[in-house]
Image (cartoon, rainbow, N blue to C red):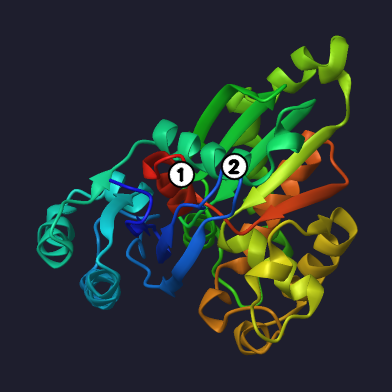
Amino acid sequence: MDSTTAIATIDVGTNTTLLLVARPGATPGAEPEVLENAAEITRLGRGIGGDGRLGAPGIAATLEALGRYAGVIARHRAQVFAVGTEALRRAPNAAEFLVPAEALLGRPIEVIDGTREADLTFRAVVESFPEELHHGRSVIVDIGGGSTELVVVLGGVPVARTSLPLGSVRLTERHVRHDPPTPEESSAIRAEIRDRLAGAHLLDELEDGAAGGPEAEPVRLFGVAGTVTSLCAMALGLSTYDPARVHGSWLSREALDGQIARLAAADQLAREKMVGLDPRRADVIYAGALLLDEIARAAGVATIRVSDRGIRWGLFFEHAPRP
């Protein structure tokens, strides 16, 4: 593959199906040339909190999105790489989706485990914020619909990574029965998140890194994927989502708490009308916001660095030739 060939990367997630078509930067350190960047909420993993089987509506919606993406990829004559995450890892009937998806794309979707998912997230963030990641202590969090990946980075080196069975869709399906959620449901969501974080012992690495030397600096938290970018867009009051404004911005804990309070008091109809929030995320954004808040608390940070570049970007950087 030469540097003029377009690369298409697809991330088939529990909640969303995302496409990036881009060419590598022409010179070392140059930004990639983005040709297409699309995200569709397809809910492949609806029901993941139950038996894990993929439902017919989610399969159909995701295949429809992939059919549209295939047309875009063909127009750019791009080489395609596609991955699937938690919903496809878990589903006993994954083949019902994967077989027709391969026919649409002309190549199979790679169903990746949580470690590889975390590695791709790290690759995307370190390419976007190299200076920040190479100094001190950092945590990268990628909140999905069915799972959340965490990477602890000390001095630019990932020292621990994990994939937790926590996500905006899964937590909503497991705990929420009322609209808006009751205080008891909110407490149950937070309790599960705290238990999972404590059981993973992942953030213990941050304390080990604080023993001295350059790693003793304050922790940085980088937030990736739709929950984080949506909350940032809401805090910024963006009536139209603008990745250039979201990527690299800061979301303070104070602003996050404000959004959580708004969401907790709103029903589905009110959430769908909130500026900055895609209405199709309105039913699961509250659980995702609580998840982000608990991770920020556990990491002891006051602000979150927001990245609009997740797994599909990591996959792009993995395959893009260096100029």
Q: Quadrant of residue 4?
A: bottom left
Q: Is residue 192 visible?
A: no
Q: Are the residues flagged by discs 1 and 2 in contact, CB closer than 8 Å?
A: yes
Report the front residue among 83 and 131: 131
Which structural element holds mark 2? helix
- Where's residue 82, x and y in %? 29, 53
Badge 1 local density, few (<14 within 10 Å), some, or many (20+)?
Answer: some
Q: Is residue 93 above or below residue 237?
A: above
**Residue at mark 1 to residue at mark 2: CA–CA distance:** 8 Å
Residues 252 and 80: in front is 80
What amino acid type should be assigned to the residue bearing mark 1? Phe
Asked which quadrant contains residue 205, the reply is top right
Picture layout, residue 316 above or below residue 197: below
Q: Look at the picture and state if 8 lies above or below 200.
A: below
Residue at left 54%, top 59%?
168
Name the residue tied to disc 1: 317
**Of residues 102 and 317, the one drawn nearer to the viewer in this rendering:** 317
Q: Which residue is mark 2?
A: 127
Q: Amino acid at mark 2?
A: Glu
Counting residues from the N terminus, which is met first, the one under dot 1 or under dot 2? 2
- Identify the secondary structure beneath mark 1: helix
Measured from the top left, where is residue 257 in percent x and y? 84, 61
The circle drawn on residue 28 is none
Q: Residue at x 22, y 51 (%)?
A: 109
Residue 88 in the image, given as x and y percentages of width and height: 28, 50
Q: Residues within 10 Å of mark 2 (few under 14, many from 20)?
A: some
Q: How far from the left and from the top, in percent, is residue 113?
A: 35, 36
Q: Quadrant of residue 35?
A: bottom left
